[in-house]
Image (tube, coloured by chain):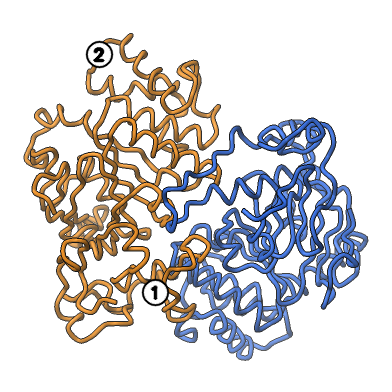
Amino acid sequence: MPASPAARPAPTPPRLAVEGLRIDGRQQGRAITVVDGLSFELRPGRMLALVGESGCGKSLTAAAILGLLPWGFRITRGHVLLDGEDVLQLPPGAWRRRRAESMGAVFQNPLTALNPTLPIGSQVVEAARLAEQLGREPARARAQELLELVGVPEAARRLDDYPHHFSGGMRQRVAIAMALARNPAILVADEPTTALDLITQAQILRLLNRLQRERDLAVLFITHDLSLVAEYADDILVMYAGRAVERGEARAFFSAPLHPYSRALLGAVPHPAAPEERLTDIEGLPPAPHEYPPGCRFAPRCPRAGTVCRHEPPPPRVGDGSHEAFCHHPYTEGP
Amino acid sequence: MSEAAFLRLEEIDVRFRLGEGGLLRRGRETFTALAGVSLTIDRGECLGLIGESGSGKSTLGRVVVQLVPPSGGRVVFDGTDLTALDARRLRPYRPRMQMVFQDPGESLNPRFTIGDIVTEPLRLLRIGTRKEQRARAARMLERVGLPAAALAHRPTQYSGGQRQRIAIARALVTEPELLVLDEPTSGLDVSMQARILNLLRDLQDSLGLSYLFITHDVGAVSYLARRVAVLYRGRVVEVAPTRDLIRTPRHPYTVALLDALPRFVRGESLPRPVITEATATTDEPPPETEGPGCAYAPRCPHRQERCRVTAPELVPAEGDKRLLACHHPF
């Protein structure tokens, strides 16, 4: 369903608005809908976290925005508005150019972005030269500047090193430098720290937060880790089985999550401050796309589910403008 | 450190030879995975072991269950030094300690049935008849929340969380007293992690098991372990009751580790950042070659001249509550 800008104050227009996105594909010969009716907005200087467990469709959503859907998957409904322009209506070449100009992306494994046989300098240089028509020396200087921006120590000396000379965290910094080479307005980060150690993870996310502030970047952060969302993101969208279950400002979400799935997820994270509290057990498993139930998709596992939940899809919104859930029986009080 | 500890690791060293493949360089270089690690676990206790990748924590787990022979030091289990035993005399001790590995997708043979997998330790150790083995396996599956009918299935039919239950059932089938849990929840979804942690807690309560719980997840460690040891580059830098370690970390590396933790997990009352994006420890190799001093010195904000020259020993601090290996702790 279309987002209603009237419902919440919008100080700045979104850089990217996704409206009613649906993604279809095939799995083992079956037609499946992997994402359905998803809407969100990315605003300059803010980070939106797309959260969910494996198979919920969060990575496919990121791939759809980037034009990187795997073979057999396609957008079958909805709009992707880039600075107000519906890019899905553009011819493929024009959309590709618009994406290249306005979006950068980093993924879980930075090696997917880096060529192992080339020094990293020349790879960042290449990205920088695509951005502007730069000569050899200015491009090298620009590459060094980009590496310094993302905190690669002794950037000038390291331009001639190969990807395997870098640690996982440094490779991810290089990948971020390349993603920023064309000065994009939007950065998509799909589980960028999942493979990294705790300290390195914190460094990379603090780096993203700084870049987001300094460059007014709109960041889409895909993660399964709610604790990272609480620390680093401004806005949140929780997905379950291909649909949004709750969305809004992260602060409002964490102070009073409305959806039973959100509550269960939060209750499943151990807190060192209260180790004696038993973790929430969510019985059963998330359904596979070909067996999504009618009505609310979380209903079969939901402690609050009633008859209406099993038959009717949950109403689009409950709660105030800054925070809303898709649920027949949301929680109304704080945790 | 009590003399009567159920498991006592004394000055464990593990060195791996590098360059085994090269004819000329064979065996010349060694990599020190563990250096002088001493730890104890009491009967029925869960000791957490945290550290980042490459810290040697998995190697230490393997040393405990005698999968990796230490280059030096002793593993004293229930009063017996296991490192002094030959394979035949070690055999009676094998069923008493088992290990749960990190990736249940990798550690379970997809060509075996779950029955074969869960009874395998019993077959290897020649415990019971085939019928008794199956009966025990069925009991263990039920104990971890899977139907006995699963015995005939293959692990590929099960989800990641269920496969980890199968791995736990396999570890429990010899009725061990000590379990080494090597990152048993990493790679699982949050809700699955919670179920495995709950299961491990229940099993410990009902069976009185001792755990060595190896993880990089500070939240998970606080849920199961009352006491935690922090490993950095093969050395124990701090051991303390979990609560104290999280509230008042004292080794600069522990402080950095906890500072990296999101506040949501750590809780608001815990100490606030000392390390920023730019100055924090990185996962890069240390800028200097390792000298005789503290392994953490090249990155340590507290380092002094002495830290480069002498390696700090792990010594009691705050009475007997904490062990600390640092010349200039917080």
Relative to the observer, which residue lies in front, B29 or B232? B232
Q: For the residues labelled 2 and 1, say whether their Cβ atoms are less than 8 Å apart.
A: no
When the figure is inspected, residue A171 is found, relative to residue A35, above or below; the finding is below
- Real-space Cα separation, disc 2 to disc 1, in angstroms: 52 Å
Residue sitting at the far right: A89
- The x, y position of residue A103, in whole percent, is 74, 70
The local secondary structure at tag 1 comes to loop
Name the quadrant containing residue B181: top left
* Chain B drawn colour: orange
- The x, y position of residue B32, in whole percent, is 21, 60
Q: Residue at x 32, y 63 (%)?
A: B245
Relative to the observer, which residue lies in front, A235 or A178? A235
When the figure is inspected, residue A146 is found, relative to residue A170, above or below; the finding is below
* Chain A drawn colour: blue
Subunit of label 1: B
Relative to the observer, which residue lies in front, A237 or A202? A237
Which residue position holds label 2? B128
Q: Amino acid at mark 1?
A: Thr
Count of marks placed on residues: 2
Name the quadrant containing residue A7: bottom right
Name the quadrant containing residue B101: top left
Going from N to C along the chain, the mark reached first, 2 or 1, is: 2
When the figure is inspected, residue B309 is found, relative to residue B206, above or below; the finding is below
Q: Residue at x 76, y 47 (%)?
A: A243
Which residue position holds label 1? B281
Subunit of label 2: B
Q: Amino acid at mark 2?
A: Gly
- The x, y position of residue A13, in whole percent, is 85, 74
Residue A123 lies left or right of residue A316; in this view the side is left
- The x, y position of residue B300, in whole percent, is 31, 78
Residue B190 lies left or right of residue B200; in this view the side is right
Residue sitting at the far front: A333
